[in-house]
Amino acid sequence: MNKEEIFTKLNSIFRDIFDDDTIVLSEGTTATDIEGWDSLTHISLIAAIEDEFGIRFDMKDVLKMKNVGEIADRIAALAG
């Protein structure tokens, strides 16, 4: 799975979780860029990402990922 495919799926997940069809993710997108992205929605995001890609993040991975690009990189490593 390439980065473009990962971002397409991530965009869909984010739009669903935040109920906002205008969200367009980039490598540098962080929680401060999306209204409502707090610790509770972060848990929902991680669960939805894990389900969609059939992967499981370690807690240390979750804590280290600072932006959507890092999430996509970890997905690529785990799903690859």
Image (spheres, rainbow, N blue to C red):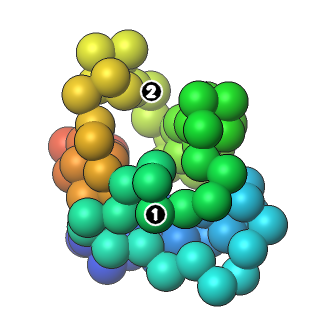
Q: Is residue 39 above or below residue 69?
A: above
List x then y, in percent, for residue 27.
25, 67
Residue 80 shown left or right of residue 26 in the figure: left
Binning the other alpha carbons within 10 Å of mark 2 as few (below 14), some (14 to 19) or many (20 upward) gives some
Compared with 61, 66 (above or below) is: below
> Is any atom of residue 1 visible in this view?
no
Tell me, yes or no, if residue 19 can be seen here: yes
> Going by the picture, which residue comes out furthest to the bottom?
22
The mark nearer the N terminus, 2 or 1, is 1
Q: Which residue is mark 2?
A: 56
SS class, disc 2: loop
Q: Is residue 13 left or right of residue 78?
A: right
Q: Quadrant of residue 61?
A: top left
Residue at image x 67%, y 69%?
A: 15
- Give left or right: position of 10 versus 71: right
> Mark number for residue 33?
1
The residue sitting at 72% across, 55% down in the picture is 17
* Residue 22: quadrant of the picture: bottom right
Left or right side of 23 for 66: left
